[in-house]
Amino acid sequence: MLSKIPIKLEKVPEEELDKQILRAGIIAELDAVNLYEQMAELTKDADIKTILLDIAKEEKTHVGEFQALLLRLDPQQGLELEAGAEEVEEELSK
C-alpha cells in the first residue's frame, strides 16, 4: 500500500515548506523501496528480481539524499535520530 502525502503542501507555511517537501520525498522513496522489494519477492523470474532489487537499492540512496538535505534544514531532526538510535541500543543491551 502506498502512502499519501498527509497534508496539502500549498497550505504549509513558507518557512516550513522545504522541510515538508523533503519529508514528502522521503515518504515517496520509502514507498518505492517497499513496492520494488515486495514485487521482487513475488516474481519467479530471476532477471526481474535482480532489476527490482537494484532499483530498490537506488531508491534507498534517494532516501539518504533527501535525509541529508533535511538534516541541514532541521537540526532537531538529527538530534531525534540520534536519540532514537540511543534508545534502541539501550533497549537491546538489556
Image (tube, rainbow, N blue to C red):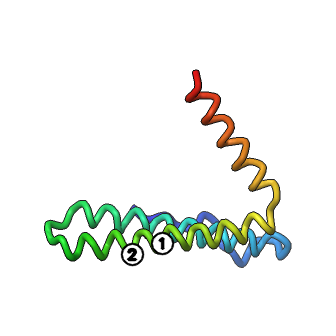
Who's the residue at 15% across and 71% down the image? Answer: 45
Residue pointed to by mark 2: 55
Front in this rendered view, residue 43 or 54? 54
Measuring from the top left, give residue 38's x and y in whole percent: 31, 61
Who's the residue at 37% across and 66% down the image? Answer: 35
Residue ranking furthest to the top: 94
Please tell me in which quadrant of the rendered image residue 66 appears.
Answer: bottom right
Who's the residue at 51% across and 70% down the image? Answer: 29
Q: Is residue 32 left or right of residue 7?
A: left
Front in this rendered view, residue 68 or 6? 68
**Quadrant including the C terminus:** top right
| SS assignment at label 1 | helix
Residue pointed to by mark 1: 59
Cβ atoms under marks 1 and 2 closer than 8 Å: yes
Measuring from the top left, give residue 20's x and y in whole percent: 70, 69
Q: Is residue 39 above or below residue 76?
A: below
Kind of residue sitting beneath label 2: Ile
Q: Is residue 35 above or below residue 88?
A: below
Kind of residue sitting beneath label 1: Glu
Q: Is residue 70 left or right of residue 51?
A: right
Please tell me in which quadrant of the rendered image residue 9 appears.
Answer: bottom right
Measuring from the top left, give residue 1's x and y in whole percent: 39, 61
Q: Residues within 10 Å of mark 1 (few under 14, many from 20)?
A: many
Residue ranking furthest to the left: 44
Q: Is residue 17 above or below residue 88?
A: below
